[in-house]
Image: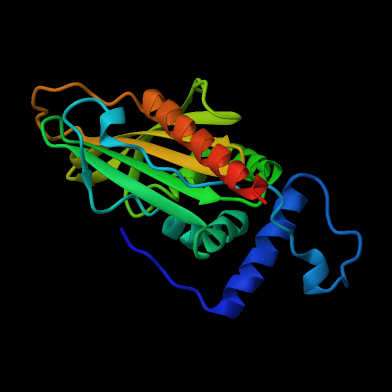
């Protein structure tokens, strides 16, 4: 999963673009189109935080691996300008992080990706924009180079402030046969100013060994608990004289 670097000038333009595009997506726009860059930049009011899931939070059999799904990079590559702007924002230092886990017995992969927005309202606007997109657009930041076989939006889990859940089936075909067939459960949710992506994937062509599948909603609850602890710690530190 790749990481990218942006030039300082390109990043500034991207940050301004995503702020403007998200405002437009929510039905509002700057009152003065000639405003300077300093006037249009959105201040960090109540930014999201980044927390990490512990292996002990997961179903037994999972172990941490040294890569995670490149949601930020695939958002950046998206043909949708707002999604691409989210990817640009995520590439700012300290704006995103992720983890990967694998269960060798079941063949499952589990990924956690966090993008830090400037405030809970900004995270909500980003979430609302994502969930308003067709499933084919959602697929663009999951595995756009593969063929999408099936997709569905599932009932939203009780996670964070806003949540959505998707089922995606994709891979490759040859002579009418699926030579790669991946099932992915995707959860997108917000918690404060954090925009979070949880992905649970397995190649259904592989014969699974004995073991219990991950509970992606339980992973989200553990992550939200860790985010709450991080926010409390930051608030306590800020309150110190």
**Disc count in the image?**
0
Q: Residue at x 45, y 50 (%)?
A: 140
Q: Is residue 37 left or right of residue 213?
A: right
Q: Report the residue that reaches farthest toward the front.
A: 241
| The one of 176 and 206 positioned closer to us in this rendering | 206
Quarter in which the N terminus is drawn: bottom left
Please state which of residues 150 and 21 is positioned toward the viewer in this rendering. 21
- Residue 143 visible here: no
Rendering coords of residue 98 (x, y %) = 38, 49
Q: Position of residue 38 (x, y in %)?
A: 79, 71
Please tell me which residue lies in front, 74 or 228. 228
Q: What's the residue at 12%, 36% (across, down)?
A: 104
**Location of residue 133 with respect to 75 vertically, above or below:** above
Whole-percent x and y of residue 103?
Answer: 17, 35
Q: Is residue 185 above or below residue 15?
A: above
* Residue 183 horizontal/vertical position (percent): 29, 33
- The residue at the point 19 percent across, 32 percent down is 204
Q: Coloured how?
A: rainbow
In the image, taking residue 100 as reference, residue 120 lies left or right, namely right
Residue 18, picture quadrant: bottom right
Above or below residue 63? Residue 18 is: below
Q: Is residue 121 visible?
A: yes
């Amino acid at each position: 999963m790749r990481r990218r670097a942006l030039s300082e000038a390109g990043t500034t333009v991207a940050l301004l673009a995503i702020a403007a595009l998200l405002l437009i997506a929510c039905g509002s726009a700057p009152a003065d189109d000639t405003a300077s860059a300093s006037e249009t930049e959105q201040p960090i009011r109540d930014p999201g935080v980044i927390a990490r899931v512990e292996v002990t939070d997961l179903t037994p059999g999972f172990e941490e691996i040294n890569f995670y799904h490149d949601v930020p990079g695939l958002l950046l590559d998206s043909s949708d300008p707002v999604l691409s702007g989210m990817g640009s924002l995520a590439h700012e230092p300290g704006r995103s992080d992720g983890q990967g886990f694998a269960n060798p017995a079941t063949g499952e992969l589990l990924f956690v990706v966090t993008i830090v927005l400037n405030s809970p309202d900004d995270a909500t606007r980003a979430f609302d924009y994502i969930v308003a997109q067709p499933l084919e657009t959602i697929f663009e930041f999951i595995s756009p180079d593969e063929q999408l076989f099936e997709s569905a939006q599932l009932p939203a889990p009780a996670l964070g402030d806003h949540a959505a859940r998707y089922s995606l089936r994709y891979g490759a075909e040859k002579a009418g046969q699926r030579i790669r067939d991946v099932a992915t459960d995707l959860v997108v949710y917000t918690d404060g100013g954090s925009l979070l992506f949880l992905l649970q994937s397995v190649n259904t062509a592989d014969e699974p060994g004995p073991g219990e599948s991950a509970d992606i909603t339980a992973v989200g609850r553990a992550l939200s608990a860790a985010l709450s602890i991080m926010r409390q710690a930051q608030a306590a530190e800020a309150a110190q004289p």
